[in-house]
Amino acid sequence: MNAHAKPMPATASKSPALAGQVRVPGDKSISHRSLMLGGLASGETRITGLLEGEDVLRTGDAMRAMGARITRQGSEWIVTGTGNGCLLEPEAPLDFGNAGTGSRLTMGLVGPYEMTTRFIGDASLSKRPMGRVLDPLRQMGVQVLEAGAGDRMPLTLRGPRHAAPITYRVPMPSAQVKSAVLLAGLNARGVTTVIEPVKTRDHTEKMLAGFGAAIEVETPADGERHIRVEGQGRLAGQVIAVPGDPSSAAFPLVAALIVPGSDVVIENVLMNESRTGLVTTLIEMGADISFENRRDTGGEEVADLRVRASELAGVVVPPERAPSMIDEYPVLAVAAAFAKGETKMLGLDELRVKESDRLAAVARGLEANGVDCEEGADTLVVRGRPDGKGIGGGTVETHLDHRIAMAFLVMGLAAEKPVTIDDRAMIATSFPEFLTLMTGLGAEIA
Ligand code: S3P
Protein backbone atom coordinates (compact mmCIF):
# COMPACT_ATOMS: atom_id res chain seq x y z
CA MET A 1 0.00 0.00 0.00
CA ASN A 2 1.43 3.32 -1.01
CA ALA A 3 0.37 5.84 1.62
CA HIS A 4 0.91 8.63 -0.90
CA ALA A 5 -1.32 7.11 -3.58
CA LYS A 6 -4.25 9.27 -4.60
CA PRO A 7 -7.20 8.64 -2.23
CA MET A 8 -10.07 6.64 -3.71
CA PRO A 9 -13.38 7.81 -2.24
CA ALA A 10 -16.49 5.61 -2.26
CA THR A 11 -20.17 6.38 -1.70
CA ALA A 12 -22.89 4.09 -0.35
CA SER A 13 -26.56 4.85 -1.03
CA LYS A 14 -29.91 3.67 0.24
CA SER A 15 -30.25 0.13 -1.09
CA PRO A 16 -33.04 -2.34 -1.78
CA ALA A 17 -33.37 -5.40 0.49
CA LEU A 18 -30.09 -7.33 0.60
CA ALA A 19 -30.34 -11.01 -0.27
CA GLY A 20 -28.02 -13.92 -0.86
CA GLN A 21 -25.59 -16.42 0.60
CA VAL A 22 -21.96 -15.34 1.06
CA ARG A 23 -18.65 -16.44 2.52
CA VAL A 24 -16.33 -13.90 4.11
CA PRO A 25 -12.55 -14.36 3.89
CA GLY A 26 -10.53 -16.27 6.46
CA ASP A 27 -10.00 -14.98 9.97
CA LYS A 28 -7.22 -12.41 10.07
CA SER A 29 -5.89 -13.39 13.50
CA ILE A 30 -5.69 -17.08 12.61
CA SER A 31 -4.22 -16.31 9.16
CA HIS A 32 -1.32 -14.30 10.62
CA ARG A 33 -0.61 -17.02 13.17
CA SER A 34 -0.82 -19.79 10.54
CA LEU A 35 1.96 -18.20 8.49
CA MET A 36 4.07 -17.40 11.54
CA LEU A 37 3.82 -20.76 13.24
CA GLY A 38 4.01 -22.60 9.90
CA GLY A 39 7.12 -20.60 9.02
CA LEU A 40 8.67 -21.47 12.36
CA ALA A 41 7.71 -25.14 12.63
CA SER A 42 9.68 -28.07 11.23
CA GLY A 43 8.22 -29.57 8.08
CA GLU A 44 5.25 -28.54 6.04
CA THR A 45 2.12 -26.62 6.99
CA ARG A 46 -0.80 -26.61 4.55
CA ILE A 47 -3.34 -23.82 4.91
CA THR A 48 -6.73 -23.43 3.24
CA GLY A 49 -9.02 -20.44 3.67
CA LEU A 50 -6.11 -18.08 4.35
CA LEU A 51 -7.07 -14.40 4.26
CA GLU A 52 -5.19 -12.99 1.29
CA GLY A 53 -5.39 -9.42 2.58
CA GLU A 54 -2.41 -7.08 2.50
CA ASP A 55 -1.77 -7.33 6.26
CA VAL A 56 -1.46 -11.11 6.17
CA LEU A 57 0.63 -11.11 2.99
CA ARG A 58 3.11 -8.81 4.77
CA THR A 59 3.47 -11.41 7.50
CA GLY A 60 4.16 -14.00 4.81
CA ASP A 61 6.83 -11.74 3.30
CA ALA A 62 8.45 -11.28 6.73
CA MET A 63 8.55 -15.04 7.36
CA ARG A 64 10.06 -15.58 3.90
CA ALA A 65 12.71 -12.96 4.65
CA MET A 66 13.65 -15.02 7.71
CA GLY A 67 13.99 -18.33 5.91
CA ALA A 68 10.50 -19.86 5.55
CA ARG A 69 9.35 -21.10 2.14
CA ILE A 70 5.79 -20.02 1.35
CA THR A 71 3.98 -20.79 -1.89
CA ARG A 72 0.42 -20.88 -3.11
CA GLN A 73 -0.73 -24.00 -4.93
CA GLY A 74 -4.28 -23.63 -6.13
CA SER A 75 -6.40 -22.74 -3.12
CA GLU A 76 -3.80 -24.03 -0.66
CA TRP A 77 -0.82 -22.24 0.89
CA ILE A 78 2.18 -24.45 1.54
CA VAL A 79 4.64 -23.30 4.17
CA THR A 80 7.93 -25.01 4.90
CA GLY A 81 9.27 -23.79 8.22
CA THR A 82 12.79 -23.28 9.45
CA GLY A 83 12.38 -25.21 12.70
CA ASN A 84 11.95 -23.50 16.08
CA GLY A 85 14.99 -21.40 16.94
CA CYS A 86 16.29 -21.39 13.36
CA LEU A 87 14.92 -18.18 11.82
CA LEU A 88 17.52 -16.24 9.84
CA GLU A 89 18.46 -12.58 10.17
CA PRO A 90 16.52 -10.65 7.52
CA GLU A 91 18.68 -8.73 5.05
CA ALA A 92 16.28 -5.78 4.78
CA PRO A 93 13.80 -4.08 7.15
CA LEU A 94 10.54 -5.99 7.66
CA ASP A 95 7.78 -3.76 6.26
CA PHE A 96 4.44 -4.46 7.94
CA GLY A 97 2.43 -1.80 6.15
CA ASN A 98 -0.74 -1.16 8.20
CA ALA A 99 -0.57 -4.36 10.27
CA GLY A 100 -0.47 -4.08 14.06
CA THR A 101 -0.92 -7.81 14.63
CA GLY A 102 1.75 -8.86 12.12
CA SER A 103 4.33 -6.44 13.46
CA ARG A 104 3.70 -6.92 17.19
CA LEU A 105 3.58 -10.71 17.04
CA THR A 106 6.71 -10.82 14.87
CA MET A 107 8.53 -8.58 17.38
CA GLY A 108 7.80 -11.26 19.96
CA LEU A 109 8.75 -14.07 17.63
CA VAL A 110 12.18 -12.68 16.65
CA GLY A 111 13.00 -10.37 19.58
CA PRO A 112 14.90 -13.04 21.54
CA TYR A 113 17.01 -14.10 18.52
CA GLU A 114 20.60 -12.97 18.64
CA MET A 115 20.18 -10.97 15.44
CA THR A 116 19.24 -7.47 14.35
CA THR A 117 15.76 -6.90 12.96
CA ARG A 118 14.30 -3.61 11.81
CA PHE A 119 10.53 -3.02 11.71
CA ILE A 120 8.89 -0.40 9.51
CA GLY A 121 5.29 0.41 8.59
CA ASP A 122 2.89 2.96 7.15
CA ALA A 123 1.87 6.29 8.71
CA SER A 124 -0.90 4.67 10.77
CA LEU A 125 1.30 1.86 12.13
CA SER A 126 4.13 4.30 12.89
CA LYS A 127 1.81 6.19 15.26
CA ARG A 128 0.77 3.12 17.27
CA PRO A 129 2.31 2.31 20.67
CA MET A 130 4.84 -0.54 20.58
CA GLY A 131 6.08 -0.12 24.18
CA ARG A 132 3.41 -2.60 25.27
CA VAL A 133 5.38 -5.30 23.42
CA LEU A 134 8.88 -3.87 23.88
CA ASP A 135 8.58 -3.69 27.70
CA PRO A 136 8.26 -7.46 28.25
CA LEU A 137 10.86 -8.11 25.53
CA ARG A 138 13.33 -5.83 27.36
CA GLN A 139 12.73 -7.92 30.49
CA MET A 140 13.81 -10.97 28.47
CA GLY A 141 17.06 -9.26 27.51
CA VAL A 142 16.09 -7.83 24.12
CA GLN A 143 17.71 -4.51 23.23
CA VAL A 144 15.74 -1.84 21.41
CA LEU A 145 18.58 -0.30 19.41
CA GLU A 146 16.45 2.40 17.86
CA ALA A 147 12.80 3.49 18.04
CA GLY A 148 10.64 6.51 17.30
CA ALA A 149 9.51 8.78 20.16
CA GLY A 150 7.40 6.89 22.72
CA ASP A 151 8.57 3.46 21.48
CA ARG A 152 7.09 3.74 18.02
CA MET A 153 8.15 2.33 14.64
CA PRO A 154 10.48 2.40 12.80
CA LEU A 155 12.40 0.39 15.38
CA THR A 156 15.28 -2.04 15.55
CA LEU A 157 15.61 -5.01 17.90
CA ARG A 158 18.65 -7.05 18.87
CA GLY A 159 18.26 -10.20 20.92
CA PRO A 160 20.60 -11.43 23.67
CA ARG A 161 22.79 -14.54 23.48
CA HIS A 162 20.34 -16.30 25.82
CA ALA A 163 16.88 -14.83 26.35
CA ALA A 164 15.50 -15.05 29.88
CA PRO A 165 12.07 -16.61 30.40
CA ILE A 166 9.75 -14.26 32.32
CA THR A 167 6.45 -14.14 34.11
CA TYR A 168 4.45 -11.28 32.66
CA ARG A 169 1.08 -9.93 33.76
CA VAL A 170 -0.46 -8.25 30.72
CA PRO A 171 -1.38 -4.73 31.83
CA MET A 172 -4.09 -4.10 29.21
CA PRO A 173 -6.55 -6.53 27.58
CA SER A 174 -4.50 -7.27 24.46
CA ALA A 175 -4.19 -10.55 22.60
CA GLN A 176 -1.30 -9.05 20.67
CA VAL A 177 0.76 -8.43 23.81
CA LYS A 178 -0.10 -11.85 25.26
CA SER A 179 0.84 -13.48 21.97
CA ALA A 180 4.09 -11.55 21.55
CA VAL A 181 5.29 -12.74 24.99
CA LEU A 182 4.26 -16.36 24.34
CA LEU A 183 6.02 -16.36 20.96
CA ALA A 184 9.12 -14.82 22.54
CA GLY A 185 8.95 -17.59 25.17
CA LEU A 186 9.34 -20.17 22.39
CA ASN A 187 12.96 -19.12 22.07
CA ALA A 188 13.87 -18.72 25.77
CA ARG A 189 15.17 -21.68 27.77
CA GLY A 190 12.64 -22.64 30.49
CA VAL A 191 9.05 -21.67 31.11
CA THR A 192 7.59 -18.29 30.14
CA THR A 193 4.34 -17.43 31.90
CA VAL A 194 1.75 -14.91 30.80
CA ILE A 195 -0.89 -13.89 33.33
CA GLU A 196 -3.98 -12.58 31.64
CA PRO A 197 -6.43 -10.87 34.01
CA VAL A 198 -9.07 -10.42 31.28
CA LYS A 199 -9.44 -13.11 28.65
CA THR A 200 -8.74 -12.02 25.07
CA ARG A 201 -8.86 -14.05 21.85
CA ASP A 202 -7.11 -17.34 22.48
CA HIS A 203 -5.88 -18.33 19.01
CA THR A 204 -2.18 -18.24 19.91
CA GLU A 205 -2.62 -20.64 22.83
CA LYS A 206 -4.79 -23.02 20.83
CA MET A 207 -2.57 -22.99 17.76
CA LEU A 208 0.66 -23.38 19.71
CA ALA A 209 -0.83 -26.50 21.30
CA GLY A 210 -1.82 -27.71 17.83
CA PHE A 211 1.75 -27.25 16.55
CA GLY A 212 3.01 -29.36 19.46
CA ALA A 213 4.36 -26.71 21.85
CA ALA A 214 4.46 -27.62 25.53
CA ILE A 215 1.83 -25.12 26.67
CA GLU A 216 -0.72 -25.18 29.45
CA VAL A 217 -3.51 -22.82 30.43
CA GLU A 218 -4.84 -22.66 33.95
CA THR A 219 -7.68 -20.49 35.18
CA PRO A 220 -7.68 -20.37 39.00
CA ALA A 221 -10.75 -19.26 40.96
CA ASP A 222 -9.83 -15.56 40.69
CA GLY A 223 -10.38 -15.84 36.92
CA GLU A 224 -6.88 -14.72 35.90
CA ARG A 225 -5.59 -17.02 33.18
CA HIS A 226 -2.07 -18.38 33.59
CA ILE A 227 -0.53 -19.49 30.32
CA ARG A 228 2.80 -21.30 30.47
CA VAL A 229 4.94 -22.20 27.50
CA GLU A 230 8.15 -24.19 27.60
CA GLY A 231 10.79 -22.69 25.32
CA GLN A 232 13.04 -24.30 22.75
CA GLY A 233 10.75 -27.25 22.03
CA ARG A 234 9.98 -28.70 18.63
CA LEU A 235 7.05 -27.44 16.61
CA ALA A 236 5.68 -29.60 13.80
CA GLY A 237 3.87 -28.44 10.64
CA GLN A 238 0.08 -28.71 10.63
CA VAL A 239 -2.90 -28.80 8.29
CA ILE A 240 -5.04 -25.72 8.93
CA ALA A 241 -8.49 -24.73 7.61
CA VAL A 242 -8.97 -21.05 8.49
CA PRO A 243 -12.61 -20.29 9.40
CA GLY A 244 -14.42 -17.16 8.18
CA ASP A 245 -13.55 -13.96 10.04
CA PRO A 246 -16.32 -12.81 12.42
CA SER A 247 -14.83 -9.30 12.30
CA SER A 248 -15.40 -9.23 8.52
CA ALA A 249 -18.78 -11.00 8.75
CA ALA A 250 -19.82 -8.10 11.00
CA PHE A 251 -20.23 -5.79 7.97
CA PRO A 252 -22.71 -7.77 5.85
CA LEU A 253 -24.36 -8.85 9.10
CA VAL A 254 -25.13 -5.33 10.31
CA ALA A 255 -26.01 -4.28 6.75
CA ALA A 256 -28.64 -7.06 6.57
CA LEU A 257 -30.08 -5.98 9.93
CA ILE A 258 -30.52 -2.31 9.02
CA VAL A 259 -31.58 -2.49 5.35
CA PRO A 260 -35.35 -3.22 5.48
CA GLY A 261 -36.49 -6.57 4.07
CA SER A 262 -32.99 -8.11 3.94
CA ASP A 263 -32.35 -11.84 4.34
CA VAL A 264 -28.71 -12.91 4.12
CA VAL A 265 -26.76 -16.05 5.03
CA ILE A 266 -23.07 -15.71 5.94
CA GLU A 267 -21.44 -19.12 5.82
CA ASN A 268 -18.64 -20.65 7.85
CA VAL A 269 -18.17 -17.91 10.47
CA LEU A 270 -15.82 -18.54 13.42
CA MET A 271 -17.86 -18.81 16.64
CA ASN A 272 -15.00 -18.87 19.17
CA GLU A 273 -16.54 -17.26 22.27
CA SER A 274 -13.61 -14.85 22.58
CA ARG A 275 -14.85 -13.30 19.29
CA THR A 276 -18.65 -13.27 19.51
CA GLY A 277 -19.38 -10.16 21.58
CA LEU A 278 -20.95 -8.34 18.63
CA VAL A 279 -23.43 -11.13 17.90
CA THR A 280 -24.36 -11.30 21.61
CA THR A 281 -24.93 -7.54 21.68
CA LEU A 282 -26.97 -7.44 18.47
CA ILE A 283 -29.21 -10.26 19.73
CA GLU A 284 -29.78 -8.26 22.93
CA MET A 285 -30.77 -5.35 20.69
CA GLY A 286 -33.42 -7.51 19.02
CA ALA A 287 -31.51 -8.80 15.97
CA ASP A 288 -32.91 -11.80 14.15
CA ILE A 289 -29.80 -13.97 13.77
CA SER A 290 -29.98 -17.74 13.64
CA PHE A 291 -27.08 -20.16 13.75
CA GLU A 292 -27.35 -22.93 11.22
CA ASN A 293 -25.15 -25.92 10.68
CA ARG A 294 -22.99 -25.42 13.79
CA ARG A 295 -19.93 -27.61 13.41
CA ASP A 296 -16.31 -28.02 14.39
CA THR A 297 -13.42 -27.38 11.99
CA GLY A 298 -9.86 -27.88 13.17
CA GLY A 299 -10.64 -27.25 16.83
CA GLU A 300 -12.81 -24.16 16.27
CA GLU A 301 -16.60 -23.93 16.17
CA VAL A 302 -18.11 -22.38 13.04
CA ALA A 303 -21.70 -21.71 11.95
CA ASP A 304 -23.67 -20.25 9.07
CA LEU A 305 -25.42 -17.10 10.25
CA ARG A 306 -28.84 -16.33 8.82
CA VAL A 307 -29.61 -12.65 9.32
CA ARG A 308 -32.91 -10.93 8.65
CA ALA A 309 -33.63 -7.20 8.86
CA SER A 310 -34.74 -6.36 12.39
CA GLU A 311 -36.07 -3.56 14.55
CA LEU A 312 -33.21 -2.83 16.92
CA ALA A 313 -33.37 -1.16 20.34
CA GLY A 314 -30.51 0.50 22.23
CA VAL A 315 -28.69 -1.38 25.02
CA VAL A 316 -25.81 -0.86 27.43
CA VAL A 317 -22.73 -2.77 26.26
CA PRO A 318 -20.74 -3.66 29.39
CA PRO A 319 -16.99 -2.96 29.52
CA GLU A 320 -16.11 -6.60 30.20
CA ARG A 321 -17.45 -7.53 26.77
CA ALA A 322 -15.01 -5.25 24.95
CA PRO A 323 -12.21 -7.79 24.37
CA SER A 324 -14.61 -10.16 22.57
CA MET A 325 -15.74 -7.46 20.13
CA ILE A 326 -12.93 -4.93 20.15
CA ASP A 327 -12.79 -4.58 16.35
CA GLU A 328 -16.57 -4.45 15.99
CA TYR A 329 -17.42 -1.17 17.75
CA PRO A 330 -17.37 0.95 14.58
CA VAL A 331 -20.02 -1.22 12.93
CA LEU A 332 -21.95 -1.62 16.21
CA ALA A 333 -22.12 2.19 16.36
CA VAL A 334 -23.67 2.08 12.88
CA ALA A 335 -26.27 -0.47 14.02
CA ALA A 336 -26.95 1.78 17.03
CA ALA A 337 -27.58 4.74 14.70
CA PHE A 338 -30.61 2.82 13.36
CA ALA A 339 -31.79 1.49 16.75
CA LYS A 340 -34.58 2.90 18.86
CA GLY A 341 -33.25 4.85 21.83
CA GLU A 342 -29.77 5.05 23.24
CA THR A 343 -26.87 2.59 22.96
CA LYS A 344 -24.10 3.07 25.54
CA MET A 345 -20.74 1.44 24.91
CA LEU A 346 -18.40 1.29 27.89
CA GLY A 347 -14.75 0.41 28.45
CA LEU A 348 -13.48 1.52 25.04
CA ASP A 349 -9.99 2.80 25.96
CA GLU A 350 -8.24 0.29 23.66
CA LEU A 351 -10.15 1.74 20.68
CA ARG A 352 -7.94 4.81 20.90
CA VAL A 353 -4.85 2.84 19.79
CA LYS A 354 -6.15 0.88 16.81
CA GLU A 355 -5.38 1.61 13.13
CA SER A 356 -6.79 5.04 14.01
CA ASP A 357 -8.19 6.56 17.20
CA ARG A 358 -11.36 4.64 16.44
CA LEU A 359 -13.43 6.20 19.18
CA ALA A 360 -12.85 9.69 17.78
CA ALA A 361 -13.08 8.54 14.14
CA VAL A 362 -16.46 6.89 14.75
CA ALA A 363 -17.84 9.88 16.66
CA ARG A 364 -16.72 12.34 13.93
CA GLY A 365 -18.18 10.07 11.23
CA LEU A 366 -21.53 9.83 13.04
CA GLU A 367 -21.63 13.59 13.58
CA ALA A 368 -20.79 14.28 9.93
CA ASN A 369 -23.84 12.20 9.02
CA GLY A 370 -26.31 13.77 11.43
CA VAL A 371 -26.28 11.07 14.12
CA ASP A 372 -26.60 12.25 17.70
CA CYS A 373 -23.69 10.86 19.74
CA GLU A 374 -21.44 11.64 22.70
CA GLU A 375 -17.80 10.66 22.88
CA GLY A 376 -16.38 10.23 26.41
CA ALA A 377 -12.82 9.36 27.42
CA ASP A 378 -13.60 5.64 27.05
CA THR A 379 -17.30 5.61 26.21
CA LEU A 380 -19.58 6.24 23.27
CA VAL A 381 -23.30 6.96 23.42
CA VAL A 382 -25.33 6.81 20.19
CA ARG A 383 -28.95 7.92 19.89
CA GLY A 384 -30.53 6.16 16.95
CA ARG A 385 -33.26 6.81 14.39
CA PRO A 386 -34.89 3.55 13.32
CA ASP A 387 -36.20 4.99 10.03
CA GLY A 388 -32.80 6.43 9.06
CA LYS A 389 -34.41 9.86 8.50
CA GLY A 390 -31.90 12.67 8.51
CA ILE A 391 -28.95 10.27 8.50
CA GLY A 392 -26.26 10.60 5.83
CA GLY A 393 -25.06 13.34 3.54
CA GLY A 394 -21.58 13.52 5.06
CA THR A 395 -18.03 12.54 4.16
CA VAL A 396 -16.13 10.39 6.64
CA GLU A 397 -12.40 10.64 7.23
CA THR A 398 -11.06 7.08 7.44
CA HIS A 399 -7.54 7.86 8.76
CA LEU A 400 -6.01 4.80 6.99
CA ASP A 401 -8.44 2.58 8.93
CA HIS A 402 -10.17 -0.26 7.04
CA ARG A 403 -12.86 -0.80 9.64
CA ILE A 404 -13.89 2.86 9.69
CA ALA A 405 -14.17 2.71 5.89
CA MET A 406 -16.35 -0.42 5.84
CA ALA A 407 -18.55 0.58 8.80
CA PHE A 408 -19.56 3.89 7.23
CA LEU A 409 -20.21 2.34 3.83
CA VAL A 410 -22.64 0.01 5.64
CA MET A 411 -24.28 3.06 7.19
CA GLY A 412 -24.96 4.58 3.76
CA LEU A 413 -27.00 1.52 2.70
CA ALA A 414 -29.82 2.38 5.12
CA ALA A 415 -29.39 6.14 5.49
CA GLU A 416 -31.73 8.67 3.93
CA LYS A 417 -28.85 10.38 2.13
CA PRO A 418 -25.67 8.81 0.71
CA VAL A 419 -22.56 8.41 2.88
CA THR A 420 -19.12 9.01 1.37
CA ILE A 421 -15.77 7.84 2.72
CA ASP A 422 -12.61 9.68 1.77
CA ASP A 423 -10.60 6.57 0.87
CA ARG A 424 -11.48 2.92 0.28
CA ALA A 425 -7.90 1.73 -0.31
CA MET A 426 -7.27 0.33 3.17
CA ILE A 427 -10.19 -2.10 2.92
CA ALA A 428 -7.76 -4.38 1.06
CA THR A 429 -5.75 -4.87 4.26
CA SER A 430 -8.39 -7.16 5.78
CA PHE A 431 -11.29 -7.72 3.35
CA PRO A 432 -10.26 -7.30 -0.30
CA GLU A 433 -13.58 -8.79 -1.51
CA PHE A 434 -15.73 -6.38 0.53
CA LEU A 435 -17.08 -4.27 -2.34
CA THR A 436 -17.83 -7.19 -4.65
CA LEU A 437 -19.42 -9.19 -1.85
CA MET A 438 -21.62 -6.30 -0.73
CA THR A 439 -22.70 -5.24 -4.22
CA GLY A 440 -23.45 -8.92 -4.95
CA LEU A 441 -25.98 -8.81 -2.11
CA GLY A 442 -27.58 -5.74 -3.68
CA ALA A 443 -25.72 -2.96 -1.86
CA GLU A 444 -25.35 0.28 -3.80
CA ILE A 445 -21.74 1.31 -3.38
CA ALA A 446 -19.79 3.14 -6.05
C1 S3P B 1 -5.65 -9.11 17.38
C2 S3P B 1 -5.85 -8.55 18.61
C3 S3P B 1 -6.59 -7.30 18.81
C4 S3P B 1 -7.38 -6.89 17.56
C5 S3P B 1 -6.59 -7.07 16.31
C6 S3P B 1 -6.18 -8.52 16.15
C7 S3P B 1 -4.88 -10.38 17.31
O1 S3P B 1 -5.66 -6.27 19.10
O2 S3P B 1 -7.81 -5.55 17.66
O3 S3P B 1 -7.34 -6.70 15.18
O4 S3P B 1 -4.92 -11.04 16.25
O5 S3P B 1 -4.24 -10.74 18.30
P1 S3P B 1 -5.18 -5.94 20.61
O6 S3P B 1 -4.39 -7.07 21.09
O7 S3P B 1 -4.34 -4.70 20.48
O8 S3P B 1 -6.45 -5.72 21.37
Image: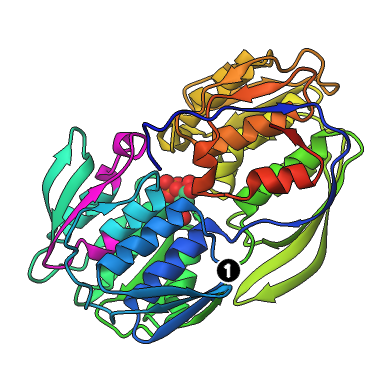
Q: Quadrant of residue 309?
A: top right
Q: In this view, which residue lies farthest toward the front?
A: 6
User: x, y (%) of residue 306?
Assistant: 83, 54
**Seen in the image, is 280 located left or right of residue 185?**
right
Q: Is residue 159 above or below residue 320?
A: below
Residue type at numbered disc 1:
Val
- Tell me, yes or no, if residue 148 can be seen here: yes
Q: Where is residue 40 shown, x and y percent of the image?
A: 32, 75
Verify whether residue 378 appears in magenta.
Answer: no
Element under disc 1: loop
* Crowd around label 1: few <14 · some 14–19 · many ≥20 (10 Å): many
Q: Residue furthest right?
A: 261
Picture quadrant where residue 45 is located: bottom left
- Image quarter in which the C terminus is found: top right
Residues shaded magenta: 108-132
Drawn side of residue 53 relative to residue 437, left or right: left
Q: How many marks?
A: 1
- Residue 441 image offset from top left, x and y in percent: 80, 46
Q: Nearer the viewer, residue 299 or 281?
A: 299
Q: What residue is shown at x 34% (from left), y 79% (from top)?
A: 81
242 to 382, vertically: above or below? below
Q: What residue did someone put label 1 on?
A: 242
In the rendered view, tell whether residue 337 sits above or below residue 198.
above
